[in-house]
Image (cartoon, coloured by chain):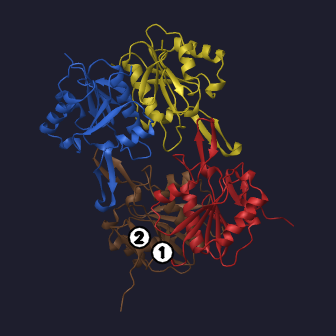
Chain colours: A brown, B red, C blue, D yellow
């Protein structure tokens, strides 16, 4: 299951990449946490990391999302992981056009990867497996669940992604 | 993608569950690391955890593996994660009969989950996603790769699972 | 060396206590990190924790510092640890009047205690030992050094506390 | 308080330095954890690290302890930290002759420094402060307490160092 080229990791920022800088007395999105997470996970599968943005996802613009869509299209292989802030992850999933034959998985974290206790490594692991095993399409991997990209929303109060509530009738 | 009942986690021991006990001046397999890992990952997907063994995988017997096969058959849903030591993970994957309609994923860790730097959360995340997205069958999720259960072996020198070398001819 | 009553820990906030809250997409000073740090350190020495403030140290007022001075005076034993933000730690050390017979140690952290890699546990350990072994007086324990309270300043550029430069002449 | 040369750290092994090696399916004492702990603690105080042994402290011999005593005598400054296994830490403290003018502090850990939750950084911080502030002599810094070297024993059942029980009469 391992002969389709590298997995492409596109990074956009978000909580997963937040570090703390004393000089600012504030959290700040820094370089991607992905390399350290993949090293700790002893990943030997080929991968490449491309930074598309470095933003809180509330600050991502349509232009950023178009650049992300282009980066997906340019990815060398057919498996793409996107690290992304949680606030607009679902919006970005809808913005991405399905790319023929590609399995695209968005993941992020509720706690920065630099925290001793964070969901970042588990979520990145989910994304890594999902892009290898799911049919082409767009997915969100958060809170232990693989969602279709068009079926999940962030429930801020519950601190969890949930399926979009069905409409009554 | 989320309506097929709980994910069943069968635990057998292995490095992932090793703690250190001063009284023994030695590592020792303790209760499963899975609950703490799933809590840190903020998993809201339904799951159940069943302990089948608590052993270094070199000590697992055919009887243990038969009990594991039975536990897979009894699992309520059709998605099963097995945490397992690395030494005989591939042997167990071959011992398990494909269970009709079930997606079974074995995962473990090279470093105990209690270590500050461990591949355990990433690997468990891979297993969680794989069992939700891969077709029925038996898989091994290690080192960033989802392998078919019959195609991977542990390469102790490289510290990695690798595909079984193809036979020449 | 252990018969002089509990060690009193006065908490005021600062980086050491910063958590990250997704709902705010920002850091926030939360309850003291001291109880978790002391539990991880397996501290059996008697101690008591009193919250005096919960602020970035740039926001501490003279009134806050007066309350801190009162809390030092009221401490049951003669050994006091103060957790404090780094920005005005030296100013607070100068504000505190030497309390007859008491050994008072200020400590904080450059990285939040919740980070996987933080100076918080080491610094709290320094403060705990210093208050047990140093003569009465006011001290700052940061960056591996025990400073007298009137001899250290924060050097933001170097990310370290340093002795006050001697005046030339 | 900072003009007496580097702090000398003598390492002897013990739980604090235990790593886990899959190839052995067992723990193993590896190189000292001190450099990583001091880096995380952002220590800028001058120090030097000298490896004297790399053993479980139950395996330390009188010859090892004599070499340790010699290393204390040879230390450039008058402040010495010794990292040591817990089982015979008290015996080593008694074996060391008080070295004129030197403050010597033994510390170790109940959990390996590589664990996510370990007492190692707190204990090393205690030792670092104690050697800077305590009068010349031999000390043990464990479980949040600075003991005189001749007054503490390991209480394995409580998982803590405790004062030697006073003799009745």
Q: Compared to B91, does D24 lie above or below?
A: above
Quadrant the N terminus of chain C occupies: top left
**Residue in the image at 44% along x and 49% along y:** A116
| Chain hosting mark 2 | A
Quadrant the C terminus of chain C occupies: top left
- Which numbered disc covers residue A78? none
Identify the secondary structure beneath mark 2: strand
Q: Earlier in the sequence, mark 1 or mark 2?
A: 1
- Residue A105: x percent and y percent? 49, 71
User: Alpha carbon of mark 1 to alpha carbon of mark 2: how far?
Assistant: 9 Å
Question: Badges 1 and 2: C-beta atoms under 8 Å apart?
Answer: yes
- Residue D117: x percent and y percent? 48, 43
Q: Nearer the viewer, residue D42 or B149?
A: B149
Q: Which residue is mark 2?
A: A161
In the displayed structure image, the side of residue C22 where residue D127 appears, left or right: right
**Residue in the image at 39% along x and 78% along y:** A95
- Residue B165: x percent and y percent? 77, 61
Q: Nearer the viewer, residue D105 or D23?
A: D105
Q: Compared to A135, does D59 lie above or below?
A: above
Q: Compared to A165, does D95 lie above or below?
A: above
Count of picture labels: 2
Crowd class of label 2 (few under 14; some 14 to 19; many from 20; radius 10 Å): many
- Residue C110: x percent and y percent? 34, 40
Residue A9 visible here: yes
Identify the secondary structure beneath mark 1: strand
Residue A7 visible here: no
Q: Residue furthest right?
A: B169
Q: Residue furthest front?
A: D169
Q: Nearer the viewer, residue B166 or A50?
A: B166
- Which numbered disc covers residue A147? 1
């Amino acid at each position: 299951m391992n002969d389709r080229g590298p997995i492409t990791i596109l990074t956009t920022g978000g909580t997963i990449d937040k570090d703390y800088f004393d000089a600012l007395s504030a959290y700040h999105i820094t370089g991607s946490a992905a390399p350290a997470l993949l090293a700790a996970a002893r990943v030997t599968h080929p991968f490449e990391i491309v930074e598309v943005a470095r933003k809180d996802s509330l600050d991502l613009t349509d232009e950023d999302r178009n650049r992300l869509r282009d980066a997906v299209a340019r990815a060398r292989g057919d498996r793409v992981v996107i690290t992304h802030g949680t606030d607009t992850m679902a919006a970005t999933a809808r913005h991405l056009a399905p790319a023929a034959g590609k399995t695209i998985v968005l993941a992020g974290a509720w706690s920065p990867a630099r925290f001793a206790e964070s969901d970042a490594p588990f979520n990145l692991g989910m994304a890594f497996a999902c892009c290898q095993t799911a049919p082409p399409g767009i997915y969100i991997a958060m809170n232990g669940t693989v969602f279709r990209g068009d079926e999940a929303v962030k429930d801020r109060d519950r601190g969890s992604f949930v399926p979009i509530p069905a409409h009554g009738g």
